[in-house]
Amino acid sequence: MYPKIDIDYEKCTTPFDCNKCLQICPQAVFDLNTLKYVRLKETDKKEPGAYKVTPIYRDRCSGCNDCVDVCPLQAITLSYPEVKKNES
Ligand code: SF4
Ligand code: SF4
């Protein structure tokens, strides 16, 4: 079973500028999206909230913990939810 990956978006506000988890992940789990578009203007990667990193390919995660270790803001948490067994 693959881990649950939570990102604290109160801490991670400028992921394009940081980019560390995206670079280090050997499984390419993370995706980066632009949330702010202004026609004919380059989005500022230092503007909080302009981009969002998401662990979209979580099913590829090997649980290596590299993203947790590299994040300078301690914004990533890995957890392993217990598998619930059927009571029948
Ligand atoms: S390493 Fe941490 S702060 Fe940097 S983009 Fe990833 S989650 Fe955000
Ligand atoms: S634990 Fe490893 S494989 Fe999983 S998302 Fe983080 S860096 Fe990628």
Image (cartoon, rainbow, N blue to C red):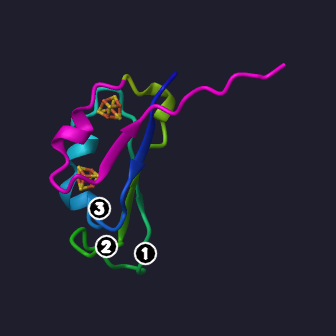
x 41%, y 28%: residue:
61
x 41%, y 36%: residue:
79
Measured as percent of width and height from the top left, residue 62 is found at 37, 22
- Which badge, 3 or 1, comes first in the chain's sequence? 3
Report the span colored magenta.
63-88
Q: Nearer the viewer, residue 81 or 44?
A: 81
Q: Nearer the viewer, residue 73 or 45?
A: 73
Q: CA distance from mark 3 to mark 1?
A: 19 Å
- In the picture of the structure, the residue carrying the numbered disc 1 is 37
- In the picture of the structure, the residue carrying the numbered disc 3 is 12
- Which badge, 2 or 1, comes first in the chain's sequence? 1
Q: Is residue 79 left or right of residue 12?
A: right
The correct choice, above or below, for 55 with respect to 75 in the image is: above
| Identity, as a three-letter code, of the amino acid under mark 1 | Tyr
Quadrant of the drawing holding the C terminus: top right
Q: Are marks 2 and 1 in contact (CB under 8 Å)?
A: yes
- In the picture of the structure, the residue carrying the numbered disc 2 is 43
User: Element under label 1?
Assistant: loop
Q: CA distance from mark 2 to mark 3?
A: 17 Å
Q: Nearer the viewer, residue 63 or 19?
A: 63
Ligand 1 near label 3 (Cβ, under 8 Å)? yes
User: Element under label 3?
Assistant: loop
x 28%, y 25%: residue:
64
Q: Is residue 76 left or right of residue 82?
A: left
Q: Nearer the viewer, residue 83 or 2?
A: 83
Q: CA distance from mark 2 to mark 1?
A: 7 Å
Membership of 83 in magenta stretch: yes
x 38%, y 53%: residue:
7
